Amino acid sequence: QNAENKALILLINLDKSKDRLAICDTQLAQSKLDYERVPGILGSALDEVEVAQVYDAKKNNWGYYKSLTKGEIGCYLSHRKAWQLIIEKEIDFAIVLEDDFKLNGSLQDAIDAISKIDIPWDCIKLTECPVKRTSSIVKTLSNFDLVQYDKLPIRAAAQAISRKGAE
């Protein structure tokens, strides 16, 4: 946990992606933000038993229009590891970053704004999706708009997850 911002920053990174880790480390260091690395799960290394424990393509567990790839399942399982850390550490929320995020603006300002939200929330996407979704502004916080989408945007490169959301 960062003493200044009271938010845990979790960075999902595959063991083999040392170059991405170095880029992320530089970005976060320049912002003077500490983080904890969460070893990502390589989807292609999952066997059929491991996949079947969390996903049944015939039932399409999550209601997607297509079956998930092993890579997508590995990504999901990596995020589950981050959620488990939020629960275990009993923190209010964490910023969960994938190792392909790009800082655009102040992550510290976003963390400060999120910590002031006074309405219940589970997940706040901190990245913009290239496909624009219909949204409405729920609340304005400093120089950020908290919006609610008609359909959850794809991508999970940067998001805030509350403990309730992690649970």
Image (cartoon, rainbow, N blue to C red):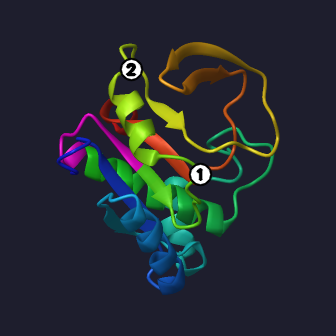
Residue drawn at (52%, 67%), measured in percent from left and top? 99
Q: At which x and y percent is residue 45?
A: 54, 80
**Which residue does the numbered mark 2 point to in the structure image?**
117
Q: Nearer the viewer, residue 84 or 162?
A: 162
Where's the C terminus, which quadrant? top left
Neighbours of disc 2 within 10 Å: few (<14), some (14-19), many (20+): few
User: Does residue 46 lie above or below 128 as drawn?
Assistant: below
For residue 83: magenta? no
Amino acid on which disc 2 is placed: Ile
Residue drawn at (21%, 45%), measured in percent from left and top? 4
Q: In which quarter of the image is residue 30?
A: bottom left
Decide if residue 130 is on the left or right side of residue 156. Answer: right
User: Does residue 58 lie above or below 73 as drawn?
Assistant: above
In whole angstroms, how far apart are the C-alphas of marks 1 and 2?
21 Å
The reply to whether callout 1 and callout 2 are in contact (CB within 8 Å) is: no
Q: Which of 4 and 18 is in front in this view?
A: 4
Q: Quadrant of residue 132?
A: top right
Q: At which x and y percent is residue 153?
A: 69, 37
Amino acid on which disc 1 is placed: Asn
Decide if residue 101 is on the left or right side of residue 92. Answer: right
Instruction: Give the mark, 1 or 2, whose residue is nearer the N terminus.
Output: 1
Neighbours of disc 1 within 10 Å: few (<14), some (14-19), many (20+): few
**SS for callout 2:** loop
**Which residue does the numbered mark 1 point to in the structure image?**
104
Decide if residue 6 is on the left or right side of residue 125. Answer: left
Residue 4 can be seen in this image: yes
Report the magenta residues as a range: 87-95
Q: Quadrant of residue 82?
A: bottom left
Residue 40 can be seen in this image: no
For residue 93: magenta? yes
Q: At which x and y percent is residue 134?
A: 78, 22
**SS for callout 1:** loop
